[in-house]
Amino acid sequence: MQITRVITERLSGENMLTDSQFATYHTEGFVVVPDVIPPADLALVRDDVETLFALDHPGRMLETDGTTVRGVHGCHQVSSLFDRLTRLPRLLGAAEQVLESKVYVYQSKVNAKLALRGDVWPWHQDYIFWEREDGMRTPRAMNIALFLDDATDFNGPLLFLPGSHLLGTVRTERRSAGDDWAANLKADLNYQLSPRQLASVAADLGIRAATGTAGSLLLFDPRLIHGSGTNMSPQDRRLLLITYNSVDNAPVPVPNPRPEFLVSTDSTALTAWEAGLGA
Ligand code: SIN
Ligand code: MN
């Protein structure tokens, strides 16, 4: 039986995506929305990210060289500017439009992928991690990424198999037996696609790079197969990622929950921040 949800609460921003962007998100599994965050606001976010990268925080992960920052997790929990960013009507409205409900921040992070040092992210789907490790019940969640730098063909952009979200969850093996959540933040991910699985899906769907200018948004479905290569260019490729989850889709309790900076347990609906990022 199909249950149609009746939306009774007023959502934060009606139709933040155009019809065409909305349709692209659903058919391809991702869409780039250009030039959303103006340069002055982007400068504020970049300054904030510098501060977060310098913080000695358990959610900060290093590349295998042991010194270069690979990513910082749980940013909305420690930075008020980051919290405001997640609630800007353009972002929050797009998340509510796609998920058709009030939402909360499930995860937030900044992946650095610095010039000449940033390492790969193997091919994977996000939802299998959230389902198997965190107890998320349905894929009624989405990622909104903000390009902090231009993402080009050469600085390790996100790569997608367009339309692969429609395949559902691809059966992949958990590579390690323990509760090593940190492995999932490095290049040795659990639940990565095998070369054979990649070849089979890529033969049908092809591979596309998600490129765009700094300040643009990239929305993508949690079942979309994605990964990224090393950054061989002299330009950094910093990507800020917010995962929104429907308030109706909060995970069920699991025996060994991952840290709060990876899975927010506060599923209170976000309210829009109308006053501007710097206010
Ligand atoms: C990347 O930063 O290239 C990978 C991001 C992700 O898989 O979440
Ligand atoms: Mn991912």
Image: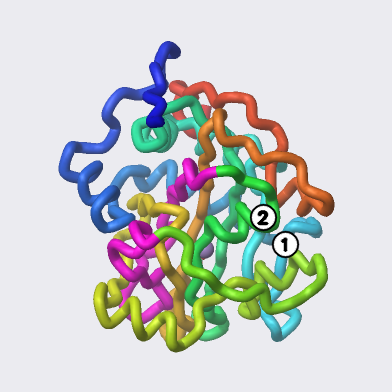
Q: How many marks?
A: 2
Would you place residue 83 above or below residue 257 in this image? above
> Where residue 264 appears, x then y in whole percent?
69, 41
Residue in the image at 35% along x and 82% along y: 200
| Stretch in magenta | 138-167
> Where residue 218 appears, x then y in whole percent?
36, 54
Amino acid type shown at disc 2 = His
Of the numbered discs 2 and 1, the one sitting upstream in the chain is 1
Residue in the image at 42% along x and 12% along y: 8
Q: Residues within 10 Å of mark 2 (few under 14, many from 20)?
A: many
Secondary structure type for disc 1: strand
Q: Which mark is residue 60?
A: 1
Camera-nearest residue between 116 and 32: 32
- On the image, numbered disc 2 is attached to which residue? 73
Would you place residue 158 above or below residue 53 in this image? below
Would you place residue 223 above or below residue 248 in this image? below
Amino acid type shown at disc 1 = Arg
Camera-nearest residue between 241 and 266: 266
> Where residue 219 appears, x then y in whole percent?
37, 50
> Where residue 29 appears, x then y in whole percent?
32, 55
Q: Is mark 1 within 8 Å of ligand 1?
A: no
